[in-house]
Image (spheres, rainbow, N blue to C red):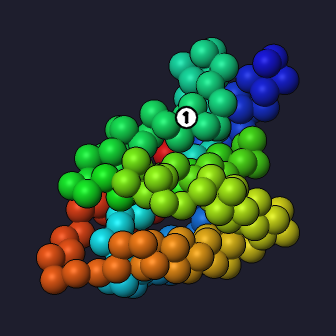
């Protein structure tokens, strides 16, 4: 726990902005927007450098942090319960994907795990934009299969990634 605490406290907050430049964020936001035209799901992206001190002191895992953000970013409030949170924790070098209850009954966790590991591999060699856009394409395929777009398809969540 101490090693992780020191690692996060010594990491600068601007790190997330350096890894994901403005053009990367724009491309990711555009990929989310294009994706959501093909299905009724809602995709929310959260990218975080160091964890807040409170999360560190509680020894929150990346999964715990993603679950908190799932609530606070409104992903749990989509009208059909088909929201997805893609959470990138840069200091811990982890990615978590949380699917709302409407999705999790149809898409097995192994699908999300595979997407997370592919993203982590791309990020490890510095391909942040490509890793994220490829993940969005894979998520799009899954959501379009189970929740194809219909006449009433409002955009309930912000398409632009949130940098924390």
The quarter holding residue 160 reads bottom left
Tell me the residue that label 1 is attached to: 65
Number of numbered discs overlaid on the protein picture: 1
* Image vertical order of residue 106 relative to residue 87, above or below: below
Q: Can residue 144 be seen in this view?
A: yes
| Vertical position of residue 104 compared to residue 71: above or below | below
Q: Is residue 67 left or right of residue 9?
A: left
Q: Position of residue 158 (x, y in %)?
A: 31, 63
Frontmost residue, 7 versus 129: 129
**Where's the N terminus, which quadrant?**
top right
Residue at the left extreme? 152
Rendered residue at 63%/15% (across/down): 57
Q: In this view, does 118 lie to the left or right of 156?
A: right
Q: Residue at point 25% right, 57% down?
A: 80
Does 120 sit left or right of 159 as displayed? right
On the question of residue 84 being in view, the answer is no
Residue appearing at x 44%, y 40% in the figure: 69
The image position of residue 27, as x and y in percent, is 50, 80
Q: Is residue 101 above or below residue 107?
A: above
Residue at disc 1, secondary structure: helix
Tell me if mark 1 has few (under 14), some (14-19) or many (20+) residues whose alpha carbon lies within 10 angstroms of its own: some
Residue beneath the point at 68% across and 72% down: 131
Pick the front one: 124 or 96: 96
Is residue 4 depicted above or below 147 in this figure? above
Q: How far from the left and from the top, in percent, is residue 40? A: 30, 72
Where residue 125 appears, x then y in whole percent?
84, 69
């Amino acid at each position: 726990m101490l090693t992780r605490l020191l690692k996060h406290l010594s990491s600068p907050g601007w790190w997330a902005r350096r890894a994901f430049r403005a053009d990367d964020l724009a491309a990711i936001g555009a990929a989310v927007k294009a994706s959501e035209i093909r299905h009724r799901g809602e995709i929310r992206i959260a990218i975080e450098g160091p964890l807040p001190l409170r999360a560190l002191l509680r020894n929150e895992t990346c999964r715990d942090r993603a679950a908190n953000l799932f609530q606070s970013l409104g992903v749990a409030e989509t009208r059909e319960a088909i929201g997805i949170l893609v959470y990138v924790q840069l200091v811990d070098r982890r990615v978590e994907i949380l699917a709302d209850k409407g999705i999790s009954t149809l898409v097995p966790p192994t699908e999300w795990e595979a997407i997370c590991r592919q993203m982590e591999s791309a990020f490890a060699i510095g391909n942040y934009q490509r890793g994220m856009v490829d993940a969005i394409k894979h998520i799009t395929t899954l959501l379009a299969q189970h929740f194809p777009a219909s006449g009433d398809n409002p955009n309930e969540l912000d398409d632009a990634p949130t940098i924390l």
